[in-house]
Amino acid sequence: MSQFAGKTAVISGGAEGIGLSIAKALGAQKMNIVLADIDQTNLQKARLELEEEGISVLTVALDVAEETQWQIVGEQAIARFGKVHMVVNNAGVGGDSGSIESQETKGWQWALNVNLMGVVYGAKVMVPLIKRHGEGGWVVNVASMAGMGGVPYSGAYTATKAAVVALSESWAGELKSKGINVSVLCPAFVQTRIYDSERNRPVQYQSDTANAVIESSFSNKTKKMVENGIEVSIVGKRVVEALNNNELYIFTHPNYRFVMQNRSAQIDKAFQNASESPLLQHIVNQKLDML
């Protein structure tokens, strides 16, 4: 029997794309699914899809940037299914693209509140519920390959996804003793509507100027790469595979391995440079004080 059977997963941004793919894959493992999303029309469509597949599902409206709404999701999940065993912090936005000087504060705040604080609030509310029953569980945070290395003209998206990777690494150590496994999903291009995040942009984050989203050859190229990405259903199945293997980093694009190898080589070279600096010889062999 699957280790997921009979347990409950809360998935933000679950109405479509990667979130719905993960919901279907976990539902196939006989998990109860709590789908939360800001798009209530697509949320109800997703509910019908899951129910047609025989999956037990609860749908709840959620703006992940609002902690109080997360609390409502938690309360409804417990009321319906009794326990929460997993949170999948999937909801995210592409944010504005463009040069450094063109980035507006509202665009940055939108990306920070959804991509970063949405993950923080999801864990803050759901982890205590997972701890409560003492059976262990999972935290799955959806970052991006962009979180493993900078992408030009995508400062807000890259920064928030890098933060999610770092948070996941931190939480993995913090929650290990509680039997809660943490994973961070870092996909490259997948066939989703991430490039059309503007459709769900709340009014408080909309630009004061006419150019809220900068259309450029870069953003158009990115859209084409997303449309030519891997089929989204693969991602959910890959997540289940990785969770069964207790993987911290979940990658969906092994062809990006050389990018990470090049980055690692540059980091290692930087440490070598530091070790050869006359300024730092007194701490080259100093014992590390680790937490």
Image (tube, rainbow, N blue to C red):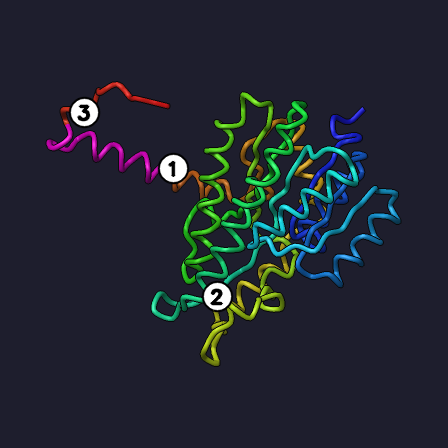
For disc 2, the neighbor class at 10 Å (few under 14, some 14 to 19, many from 20) is: many
Residue found at x 63% / y 27%: 245
Q: Identify the image quadrant of residue 279.
A: top left
Residue 1 tag number:
none
Residue 15 in picture, x, y percent from top left: 72, 55
Q: Position of residue 186 (x, y in %)?
A: 55, 44
* Secondary structure of residue under mark 2: loop
Q: Residue at x 81, y 52 (%)?
A: 47
Identify the main secondary structure in magenta. Answer: helix
Q: Is residue 277 magenta?
A: yes
Residues drawn in magenta? 265-280
Camera-nearest label, 2 or 1: 2
Residue at 48%, 49% (x, y): give it: 161
Quarter holding the N terminus is: top right
Pointer 1: what residue? 264
Considering only vertical position in the picture, is 69 above or below 75?
Answer: below
Q: How far is the residue under mark 1 from the one under mark 3?
A: 22 Å
Query: Circle 2 is placed at which residue position?
Result: 96
Tell me the element at label 1.
helix
Task: Name the amino acid, label 1.
Answer: Ser
Residue 24 in which image quadrant: top right
